[in-house]
């Protein structure tokens, strides 16, 4: 099937032409599953993430998919199979393209990524790419006209940090000069993409390295021209499994400090926080209230398995997220994505985190967070304590 033959073209949409969509703002974040939960009264599949490569030019010490990275890879499933399955997703609002470094192969950019983004545009669906933006700008330039959000990782205060973190798992030495060149290119590419109208969203993780300099990292992200700073705690998945863990209290203090020193003009998005309004710890509840009342600050509920599934484009296997230990629970060769999503919702793991407190705009913990901090907690026995 050609992308020009999709259902949405039959409905009269023209591929490649932008729809009149509400801008992405703190008030309008279609990746947050609370929106569809409110709208439909239950979780719906509104977001599909696709893993298009396991290749990457970096080997970051915290990489959540580090164990899956390879040096060569097989052919992907036909693009038409993926487009057909996307076309069947009744309430699709967003797509995400991830890797590895999705743009590592120029062929993948041309033959998969550009058509997927064009499809999304033609349907009025928002798009995101997760990239390290360290490759030559022409890779990203091809994507920019059709792309809404370029999501990058930024956990550094200088090229030395980048060198130490970004190649920690290389298995061979990478010179400081070579790393510094990539660091400069990343900053330059982020600036150019912002100027081209793409919402560049830089994500920092709060971990043992960044906890004491998260305000400095924030300042650099603002200087790079990013429109959003995303902050997530680091969880021990894949390469990050052996890294030192910080306590919830340290995390809370780092977030407080960041809020005290942030630039109020840039959107700050917090996600996968281990704090909930049902906590017995008043300081955690206070932090959540502060986050809710600060202008230009949002806390996104976790999309994985709530409004989003991940499709591996090498096998067609469908996962709850690209970095989970939960095995695939279906394949797009046999099943529709909406049907697989319904199946996932009945899974005991999905059930274990599917609480919902409407007054707190909360729809439960992330699976990794529950596993790390709340193993024996039954969230169905809890509810938000709102002052
Ligand atoms: S939805 Fe779940 S995690 Fe959130 S406040 Fe309620 S019980 Fe706690």
Image: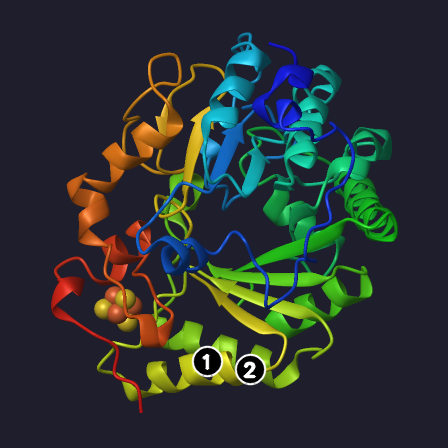
Relative image position of residue 142 (x, y in whole percent): 82, 29
Q: Nearer the viewer, residue 310 or 234?
A: 310
Q: Is residue 236 left or right of residue 76?
A: left
* Position of 175 relative to 247 (above/below): above
Q: Is residue 206 visible?
A: no
Q: At 54% from the left edge and 70% from the top edge, which residue is drawn? A: 298
The answer to whether marks 1 and 2 mark residues whose Cβ atoms lie closer than 8 Å is yes
On residue 315, the disc is: none
Q: Is residue 272 visible?
A: yes
Q: Nearer the viewer, residue 348 or 106?
A: 348
Figure quadrant of residue 11: top right
Relative image position of residue 132 (x, y in whole percent): 67, 41
The residue carrying mark 1 is: 253
For numbered disc 2, what is the local secondary structure?
A: helix
Where the C terminus falls, by quadrant? bottom left
Relative image position of residue 75 (x, y in whole percent): 55, 7
From mark 1 to mark 2, how far is it between C-alphas?
A: 6 Å
On residue 257, the disc is: 2
Q: At 39% from the left edge and 12% from the top edge, which residue is drawn? A: 333
Ligand 1 lies in quarter = bottom left
Q: Is residue 18 left or right of residue 259?
A: right
Question: Which residue is most to the bottom?
Answer: 387
* Position of 333 relative to 178 (above/below): above
Figure quadrant of residue 181: top right
Q: Crowding near pointer 1: few (<14 within 10 Å), some, many (20+)? A: some
């Amino acid at each position: 099937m050609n992308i020009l033959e999709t259902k949405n073209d039959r409905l009269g949409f023209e591929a490649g032409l932008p729809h009149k969509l509400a801008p992405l703002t703190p008030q309008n974040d279609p990746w947050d599953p609370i929106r569809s939960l409110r709208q439909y009264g239950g979780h719906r599949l509104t977001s599909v993430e696709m893993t298009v490569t396991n290749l990457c030019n970096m080997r970051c010490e915290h990489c959540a998919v580090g164990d899956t990275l390879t040096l060569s890879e097989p052919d992907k499933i036909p693009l038409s199979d993926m487009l057909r399955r996307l076309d069947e997703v009744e309430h699709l609002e967003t797509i995400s393209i991830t890797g590895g470094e999705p743009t590592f192969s120029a062929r993948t950019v041309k033959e998969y990524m550009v058509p997927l983004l064009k499809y999304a545009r033609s349907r009025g669906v928002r798009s995101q790419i997760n990239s390290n933006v360290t490759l030559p700008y022409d890779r990203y330039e091809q994507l920019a006209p059709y792309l809404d959000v370029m999501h990058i990782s930024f956990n550094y205060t200088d090229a030395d940090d980048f060198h130490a973190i970004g190649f920690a798992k290389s298995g061979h030495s990478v010179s400081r000069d070579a790393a510094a060149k990539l660091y400069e290119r990343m900053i330059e590419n982020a600036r150019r993409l912002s100027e081209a109208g793409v919402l560049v969203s830089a994500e920092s993780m709060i971990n043992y390295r960044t906890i004491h300099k998260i305000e400095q990292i924030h300042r650099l992200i603002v200087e790079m021209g990013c429109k959003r700073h995303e902050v997530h705690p680091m969880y021990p998945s894949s390469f990050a499994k052996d890294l030192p863990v910080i306590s919830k209290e340290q995390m809370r203090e780092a977030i407080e400090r960041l809020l005290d020193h942030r630039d109020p003009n840039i959107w700050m998005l917090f996600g996968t926080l281990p704090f909930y309004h049902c906590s017995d710890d008043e300081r955690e509840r206070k932090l959540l209230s502060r986050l809710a009342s600060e202008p230009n600050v949002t806390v996104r509920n976790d999309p994985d398995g709530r409004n989003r599934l991940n499709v591996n484009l090498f096998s067609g296997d469908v996962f709850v997220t690209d970095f989970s230990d939960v095995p695939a629970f279906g394949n797009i060769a046999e099943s529709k994505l909406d049907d697989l999503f319904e199946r996932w919702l009945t899974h005991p793991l999905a059930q274990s985190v599917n609480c919902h407190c409407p007054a707190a705009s909360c729809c439960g913990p992330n699976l990794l967070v529950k596993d790390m901090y709340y193993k024996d907690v039954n969230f169905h026995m809890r509810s938000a304590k709102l002052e």
